[in-house]
Image: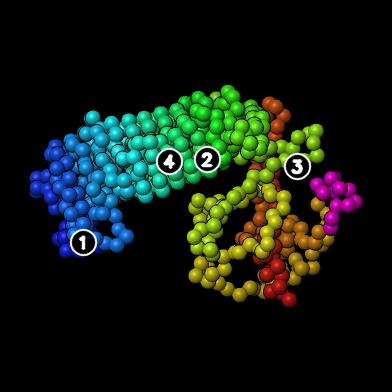
Amino acid sequence: MALTKVSYSMITGSPVNVMDYMTAAQIADVISGADTLDVSSAINAAITAAAAAQSANPVPGRAPGSVYFPPGSYRCTTTINAASIGQLIGESRDSVKILCYATPAVTCHTSLSVTGIYFFRKTGGSTCLEYPSGAYLPQILYNAFTSFNIGIDFQGSFGITKTLIEGNSFDSNVIAIDAGGTCTTLAVKNNQFNTGTTSILCDNCFNFEITGNNFEDYTTPIVVNTQLVGSLIAANWFEKAAAASVTPYTDNTNSPGFFTLVNFLSNRYISTATPIYGVNCIVADTSSVTTYTRASVNDPNGGGIYAATFYDPLITAAAASTAPANYTVRTQDAVASLTSPGGDYVFRLGAGSNAARYGAPRPFVDNTSNLGDASFRWAVVFASTGTINTSDQNEKAQIETLSDAEKATALAIKANIKKFKFKDAVIAKGDKARIHVGVIAQEVAQAFVDNGLEPQSYGMFCSDTWHTIVDESGETKVVYPDEKGDYPQGAVQHTRMGIRYDELLAFIISSI
């Protein structure tokens, strides 16, 4: 249950509710979203009260005062002066909107943390959050900033230290984050940047972490004017809505220091006129239209040679098609003149604060996506232990013992275990192809039929079908049906049968 205004006032050190300082008419205006009555003075009065209360009743380790915004739309025609407190807390950015008519919309304490507020510029509010030089330890979490010239402005020659900006949405801002002069230990993580000129602008930058963000349709997403040292810019997504080049990182000094950039670019419109110093990009590609290779680049600071980046960029919009788009990650092929393997696609997974939990590549939705399919299979899977299959009684229904017909089928399959060699291995290796032991899927199916059972009713037996067509270039491609279920003219159907050996072996054991 949410705390009421009365409850807040009874708890020492709790956030001050801004509605405690509003008239009934102002509260009604805020709740209705009418945007007719200014509430700036009431908010500033709440801030003054919060600072005084925290000063009189200090809480060890706590920022000097907090103010809470219940759901509603707050019209602010003068600046919110938060230079004396440590926190602005909204119920959520989906329910709390501050309509900004003044600039800056908020003047901030050096360590002001802001959470759960949607800031929307109306008129005049060219800057949203304005921090003084030397901002230290602010956390700006799960807010939204729309239509500002500068969303978050860290001012002065000494900009910020130990700052976290995470989970925010920046829409139609000229500059989303201006990190000021010298900045250290800034983390910009998991934010959404939509439409603007520059997402992150900074000068002297040390120990930056810019990860997991989505930069969509920004002219210059990340701009460093002086240097970027000891930093990580990785696992971000860069995309443009129109046919134009995507340059994730702009270095205006050509002396960026030591840092790592490994990011993802949109598969819609990619072009690069010249090599970008120090940028390694992984590009989604569905067309194989053009191959672009960036040559190796020497680090002017003596850090060695940056490896070449290889990708297949999609230069123009793909033609309309009912076929689903694939996301292709391609690494460097082996160079024909060298006896070297092709490049690997490497997951670098970080450990969590809990040593028992490490990062893992996984599907977005549980129990929905496959790893490969019948037409595109993994050759070998290396693992230190076997796979774990769901066997919880709570997730099973119609649990029964095997029938006599099923046990007879299991005996027949056991009698048909054979040794064999795979055809592609024989073609590649001849007599040196290795011997395998197992069953023949067609014989397994026949054993079920001979005992009056339907093989397709059992999970151990698999039969997968797909269609291919040879395109104008002579390349064979998998094709999919249109909205009517029809395949292109000339499509060839393929079927491949398979066995789930974990289930098959359990089935056979039941007959022993």
Kindly report the secondary structure that dominates the magenta region of the rendered protein.
helix
Which sits earlier in the primary sequence, circle 4 or circle 1? 1
Q: What is the x, y in percent for residue 134?
A: 35, 43
The reply to whether callout 2 and callout 3 are in contact (CB within 8 Å) is no
Disc number placed over residue 229 in the picture, else none: 2
| Residue that appears at 79% across and 68% down | 415
> Identity of the amino acid at label 3?
Pro
Q: Earlier in the sequence, mark 2 or mark 4?
A: 4
Amino acid beneath label 4:
Cys
Question: Mark number for residue 183?
Answer: 4
The residue indicated by pointer 3 is 341
- Under circle 1, the secondary element is loop
Of the residues under marks 3 and 1, which one precedes in the sequence? 1
Task: Pick whichever of labels 1 and 2 is earlier in the sequence.
Answer: 1
Magenta region, residue range: 423-435
Alpha carbons under labels 2 and 3: distance apart: 32 Å
Q: Which of 500 and 30 lies nearest the eye of the viewer? A: 30
Q: Quadrant of the C terminus?
A: bottom right
Q: Does residue 489 sit above or below 235 in this rendering?
A: above
Answer yes or no: do the residues labelled 4 and 1 have beta carbons within 8 Å?
A: no
